[in-house]
Image (spheres, coloured by chain):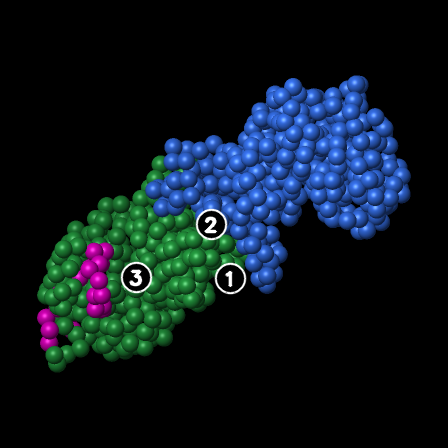
Chain colours: A blue, B green
Amino acid sequence: MSESNNYCVIMAGGVGSRFWPMSTQKYPKQFQDILGTGSTMIQQTYDRISKIVAPENIYVITSKEYITLTEQQLPDLNPANIVGEPMMKNTAACNMYMARKIADKNPQANIIVLPADHLILNETVFLQKIELALNLAATKDYLITLGIKPTRPETGYGYIQFVENQEWDYFKVKTFTEKPDLEIARTFLESGDFLWNAGIFVWNVQTILAAFDEYLSEMSQHFESCEYNTAEEERCIDVIYPKVAKISIDNGILEKAKNVFVIPADIGWSDLGTWTSIYENAAKDNNKNALKSRHILTYNSKGNIINLKNKNKAAVIDGLKNYIIIDTDKALLICPRENDQLIKEYVQDLKNLKKGDKFL
Amino acid sequence: MSESNNYCVIMAGGVGSRFWPMSTQKYPKQFQDILGTGSTMIQQTYDRISKIVAPENIYVITSKEYITLTEQQLPDLNPANIVGEPMMKNTAACNMYMARKIADKNPQANIIVLPADHLILNETVFLQKIELALNLAATKDYLITLGIKPTRPETGYGYIQFVENQEWDYFKVKTFTEKPDLEIARTFLESGDFLWNAGIFVWNVQTILAAFDEYLSEMSQHFESCEYNTAEEERCIDVIYPKVAKISIDNGILEKAKNVFVIPADIGWSDLGTWTSIYENAAKDNNKNALKSRHILTYNSKGNIINLKNKNKAAVIDGLKNYIIIDTDKALLICPRENDQLIKEYVQDLKNLKKGDKFL
């Protein structure tokens, strides 16, 4: 395997409405230093993978709206490697687009697909597992995903049931189930045969293109019509994008394909999908408050996540337990941590206000 | 009594730290539309008294720091009638200063003294009682105060014990007690013989000057040394102010004088001395939330006072009951309503932070 065959696609198209008001349409979560570590989520993702993939082989696919933000935050990246989608079409379309584009450059490419906004604490194990996956992808026609041992009956993730094989450090996938209901998630958790799908994929470009041809043949024909890495590419993509299905790579390919393999990976992973997961991963003071500002006084307050976007602003918080308190120039959010799943609904209610869009 | 003998002094020197962060050193409560009515407290006070006192006879005494704010908010007032104190010296000094200054203009002046930041809902009764007081002041050597029927054992007010006389609509004051402790306040409330001192005074300038000579003779001698309404006035005041005692007019004069009379006045009064009193006097929605912004969504939240200084900002508040939520560009305060007396302590704690003054 030549190292120059290894490519990475960072998916950075989300709008992060579950993190309103910190994350907004104009400035979503992946472009923010949401844990207060000094670098944004996409910067962390780029820095992590650039240890094993050459910068010229790293691509970001995002909304056209976020191309400038991406260029600003990843100045080492060739702007030609930042690809803008004309509209949101879920993850099947962007993966097919990038597979076609990279195949045109290098038909032997092995592609690592990474979400831009996930937390990975154990970088060493992560890189080991990615190396293993790249070796598999280069030599076998496998679609490979990293699997995380579940710790709760989460209904927001995809679950991977695997066929145990004590000799290997990767397993054939038996079933792939996206976002089960709570009852099913509980049985998955109890059975011990399931891993979470971390949304981190590795495949050879020919393997994934063959899967697209088989399971998403109409979409595949659309993308076949473009000439990639030419002056015509953008115009062609603008024409076909409105026509292609909105479907996730999980629903469209992984649930159907017979050649899906999972590598269990204890990588300290969180998708940081809710304020509660941010809270769990953030540094906390003696009262278990996660404070993201230097100027916060708390009294009789525990278990809160308090985040002021304006770093020159003070806060005095008295008598709150287990709340989310997020303050930006446009909006103030105060809600119980256990209601963090309702934030999308608050945002919808705000949209329904007269001129409510300006707060989003 | 000639109407042109009637003067008004609006006292506007407070810094309002109990209303932090809405009220700040640079922009205190009297200069804010704290109830959301469309006019600031000092504008309401001016508008109310200008119905019976000519504009050229209305004075504002405030800190030098707030002269520009006063000019901006009261454009009808002659700037010469806005008097700046070089430092805070409580209410005896500013009343003596203004009595000297007005006596120099008109030795027959009757002076109405009004705090700039109090709420008076019943303007008609207020003006009737002031007219009565002016008549008394013009004809008798009385120091007159308006008295409010107490509704709770408030320890922050002065209490007036009066000598009942069923024939008159004003009473001689028997004792005058500033800020009693809770036990005494309770006995005052139960006895029925006490009224709250609203800090609204009416006196003839000769009567109050005589009282100053008798009870605050040292201070009186200091103020006697200046030539008022001349180019020398400000320099002289700057020299004597550091020397005079910090004492309230209540402690210095009213508790001692024998010629104090009270007019019971059912004027819908509040000193708006705490956020709780602001809450009680503010318009409230169906959930008893007092919301001062058009863009606030509340869920499972009752009895809160929510005030966003930036009127283009939204707030989503979930799961708070009986809280104070105040948001400004500099600071966010969230505390239980019952802790509104602690705000001064929060402010002190903020001052102790490195560079904490910038939040005040």
The reply to whether the magenta stretch includes residue A238 is: no
State how far apart marks 1 and 3 are (Cα). Answer: 26 Å
Query: Which residue bears the numbered disc 1?
Result: B294
Q: Would you say residue B157 sits in the magenta stretch?
A: yes
Q: Which residues are magenta?
A: B140-165
State the image coordinates of residue B22 (x, y, percent, origin top left). 41, 53
Q: Chain of mark 3?
A: B
Callout 2: chain: A
Q: Which element is circle 3 on?
A: loop
Q: Which quadrant of the view contains residue B160?
A: bottom left
Mark 2: amino acid: Cys
In the picture, measured across the screen, residue B347 lies left or right of residue A36, that is left
Q: Residues within 10 Å of mark 1 (few under 14, many from 20)?
A: few
Name the front one of labels 1 and 3: 1
Are marks 3 and 2 in one subunit? Answer: no
The part of the image, by quadrant, that contains residue A209 is: top right
The answer to whether B98 appears left or right of B71 in the picture is left
In the rendered image, which residue does mark 2 sit on? A335
Q: Residue furthest bottom?
A: B167
